[in-house]
């Protein structure tokens, strides 16, 4: 008996009119979906809070709408979030869109207080989620602890913003308000190239958020905290470079200012930030600290710091400048000149300095990323204190300012 491997079947295929009907149906369904994608992404819910949180990346037209909405619904607090400004970094007076947008709103005659919550430059991905984490971190600092708040955003981005903020705040996010995107016609988004780019980008991002995005809140929080620290440090360094480039303030010789190319630093390294124990000891008599010239400023030993680096116990003495104290009785600064094994190789041979405030308890944070050169490293005309021998560290401090070339 033969075994059949194949069998004949009769199948039904559409006729011409059947295919035409199917094409018309698919086209109609596609048109229906296309026409409703924007309204789906542009999620909006009526306002119901006293705190209005604005995403600071929206354009000035959106900021004007936010002001009108704030006044119409009688809000008590306005908070603006913002991502870093990564272009024109050296030219812009603002490092983030939160501060820049707040300034724009002041120019629009908005007179109420504006609280800003930027996210640091270290956050390069998942910035909407990072914005929500940063906002949650900053409530206490702002002096606002709301039971709920409303979010003001723009157009097709609103549904993704709602999803991200819900992940952090849950039901504390109440209203979602959207500004009109002036760059394209929302309902007819498919009639412009920009509309296509924005809507499809937001649609893909939304599905990614729902299907694949599983954030680690603790990891993001740690990244934000470290990023704030680095941004503040970088801001101080930019300011110092500007100080050095100004003929009226620069410690450089006038002939060297035009060729100044900036101060060189070690990479920021949190391992060189220590919580040192601090023991006050003002029993020693005051003394005249040696300098690179005949000048002998009066100091006194104020206290001793102890901390460990790679199982090595290190000690530094903090000094109080009595000349400064005579001029200002409220002066709270302490001076820590030190040398280490990098001197003369990677750093200035005469040592470097740290400035700290008198601590309120028996611990003090010492941050070598803020170690700076004496002015003698830049021009021999200056008179600079020489670090006493007791502040010579037998380790390499690979943080702070490097040797000036």
Image: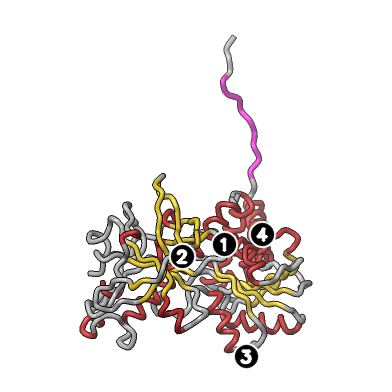
**Which tag, 4 or 2, sits closer to the chain's start?**
4
Magenta segment includes 9: yes
Magenta segment boundaries in residue numbering: 5-13
Give the residue at mark 1: 361
**Which tag, 1 or 2, sits closer to the chain's start?**
2
Residue at position x 36%, y 67% in the image: 353
> Quadrant of the image for the N terminus?
top right
Q: In the rendered structure, find residue 214 and report the number of the disc placed on it.
A: none
- Number of other residues with Cα within 10 Å of mark 2, as a class: few under 14, some 14 to 19, many 20 or more: few
Residues 115 and 197: in front is 115
Magenta segment includes 243: no
Coordinates of residue 52 in the picture (x, y in percent): 70, 74
Residues 53 and 223: in front is 223
Please tell me in which quadrant of the rendered image residue 242 appears.
bottom left
Select label 4 or label 2 by which is in front: 2
Coloring scheme of the render? secondary structure
Using the numbered discs, state the Cα–Cα distance from disc 4 to disc 2 in whole angstroms: 61 Å
**Which tag, 3 or 2, sits closer to the chain's start?**
3
Residue at position x 70%, y 77% in the image: 77
């Amino acid at each position: 008996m033969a075994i059949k491997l194949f069998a004949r079947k009769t199948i039904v295929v559409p006729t011409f009119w059947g295919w035409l009907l199917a094409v018309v149906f698919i086209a109609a369904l596609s048109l229906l979906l296309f026409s409703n994608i924007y309204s789906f992404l542009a999620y909006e819910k009526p306002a119901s809070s006293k705190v209005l949180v604005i995403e600071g990346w929206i354009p000035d037209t959106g900021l004007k709408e936010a002001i009108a909405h704030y006044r119409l619904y009688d809000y008590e607090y306005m908070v603006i979030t913002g991502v870093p400004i990564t272009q024109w970094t050296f030219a812009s007076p603002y490092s983030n869109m939160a501060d820049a947008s707040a300034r724009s709103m002041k120019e629009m005659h908005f007179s109420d207080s504006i609280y800003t919550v930027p996210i640091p430059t270290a956050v390069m991905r998942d910035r909407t989620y990072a914005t929500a984490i940063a906002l949650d971190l900053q409530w206490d600092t702002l002096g606002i602890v709301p039971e709920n708040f409303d979010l003001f955003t723009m157009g097709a981005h609103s549904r993704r913003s709602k999803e991200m903020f819900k992940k952090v705040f849950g039901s504390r996010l109440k209203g979602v308000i959207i500004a009109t995107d002036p760059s394209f016609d929302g309902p007819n988004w498919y009639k412009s190239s920009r509309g296509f780019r924005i809507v499809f980008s937001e649609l893909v991002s939304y599905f990614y958020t729902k299907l694949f995005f599983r954030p680690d809140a603790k990891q993001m929080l740690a990244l934000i905290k470290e990023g704030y620290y680095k941004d503040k440090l970088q801001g101080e360094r930019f300011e110092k470079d500007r100080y050095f480039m100004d003929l009226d303030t620069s410690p450089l010789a006038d002939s060297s200012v035009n060729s100044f190319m900036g101060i060189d630093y070690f990479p920021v390294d949190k391992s060189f930030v220590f919580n040192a124990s601090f023991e006050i000891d003002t029993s020693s008599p005051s003394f005249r600290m040696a300098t690179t010239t005949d000048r002998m400023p009066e100091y006194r030993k104020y206290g001793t710091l102890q901390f460990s680096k790679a199982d090595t116990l290190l000690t530094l003495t903090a000094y109080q400048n009595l000349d400064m104290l005579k001029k200002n009785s409220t002066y709270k600064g302490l001076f820590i000149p030190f040398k280490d094994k990098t001197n003369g190789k990677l750093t200035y041979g005469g040592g470097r300095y740290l400035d700290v405030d008198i601590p309120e308890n028996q611990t003090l944070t010492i941050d070598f990323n803020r170690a700076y050169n004496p002015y003698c490293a830049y021009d021999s005309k200056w008179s600079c204190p020489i670090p006493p021998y007791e502040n010579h560290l037998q380790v390499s401090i690979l943080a702070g300012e490097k040797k000036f070339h």
